[in-house]
Amino acid sequence: MRQDSGLSVAAAGADDLSRIRELLAANGLPVEDLVDPVGTLLIARDGGALAGVVGLEAYGRTALLRSLCVPAERRKRGVARLLYAAAESVARGLQVSELCLLTTTARTFFERQGFVVAPRDGAPAEIRESPQFRDLCPSTATFMRKPLAPAGARYLPNRLLPLQPDVPGARMWKVALDGAAMTYFEVDAGVRFERHAHEGEQITTVTEGELYFELDGVTVRVGPGDAIAIPVGVAHAVFTREQSARAFDSWSAPFPPGNR
């Protein structure tokens, strides 16, 4: 959680959705696609009051910044800058290398944050296919973009680390710096990661259930609290049997984008 002058910024929860929708609608911002805010929205609070909101939709190495809004009575107090800084910190933690946005009223604010106006038809394909770009924002909205260079610490609340599908029956998220990464996996019973090797070192620890690592001539069971360290280039398969598993992997660089 980020705090500044009595304000706090944290991931929005389901209980915040109605207030967020009211705030955005009152300021002419799209709400049609806001069904579940978990994993997409940060909110600023001042005590129990909603002091602002910002959204982040990650599409690989590019992310769409959206729905940055502060109630009229709380503007010019640094809330928007605080929210933007928190969103950028989350984006860096997700290895986003460029932020994009569409705006009809806040071009000057975003220019102060380092964004530049760019042609809409030059937007990354993933951004062009987003509901905001394709349907919800008017064609007159200004398209802006900003490259991100990795810097500083990165705060990543759990709600902003949505699980992504990996092999069938397994889901994961990843957080990375320049020279290290961590992945978290939830693996159903009876799932197998076929034999593979990595260019980086891997250390896996299981928190729930059990994983089996099939190495040359031996199968190793890794249970809760156990760890296994795998050097560069060592081939292995990983599987579950009757139990599901939850586990964390730590990686040295280079590490694969879809780690397992």
Image: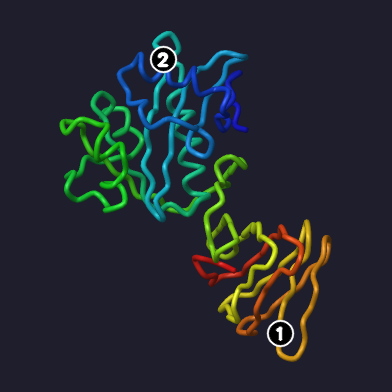
Q: Nearer the viewer, mark 2 or mark 1?
A: 1
Disc 2 or 1, which lies upstream in sequence? 2
Dividing the picture into quadrants, the one containing residue 29 is top left
Dividing the picture into quadrants, the one containing residue 35 is top left
Q: Residue at x 29, y 34 (%)?
A: 111
Secondary structure found at label 2: loop
Say the numbered circle drawn on residue 26: none
Dividing the picture into quadrants, the one containing residue 145 is top left
Q: Residue at x 78, y 65 (%)?
A: 210
Where is mark 2, residue-wise? 75
Q: Position of residue 116 (x, y in %)?
A: 25, 41
Q: Give amino acid for label 1.
A: Leu
Q: Position of residue 26 (x, y in %)?
A: 36, 13
Q: Residue at x 45, y 12 (%)?
A: 74
Mark 1 is surrounded, within 10 Å at the Cα level, by few (under 14), some (14 to 19) or many (20 or more) other residues, namely some
- The answer to whether residue 48 is left or right of residue 98 is right
Secondary structure found at label 1: strand
- Alpha carbons under labels 2 and 1: distance apart: 59 Å
Quarter the N terminus occupies: top right
Q: Residue at x 55, y 58 (%)?
A: 177
Q: Is residue 132 above or below residue 27?
A: below
The reply to whether discs 2 and 1 touch (Cβ–Cβ < 8 Å) is no
- The answer to whether residue 82 is left or right of residue 201 is left
Between residues 117 and 196, which one lies in front from this camera angle? 196
Mark 2 is surrounded, within 10 Å at the Cα level, by few (under 14), some (14 to 19) or many (20 or more) other residues, namely few
Say the numbered circle drawn on residue 215: 1
- The answer to whether residue 65 is left or right of residue 2 is left
Q: Position of residue 155 (x, y in %)?
A: 59, 42
Q: Give amino acid for label 2.
A: Arg
Scheme of image coloration = rainbow
Q: Position of residue 170 (x, y in %)?
A: 60, 61
Quarter the C terminus occupies: bottom right
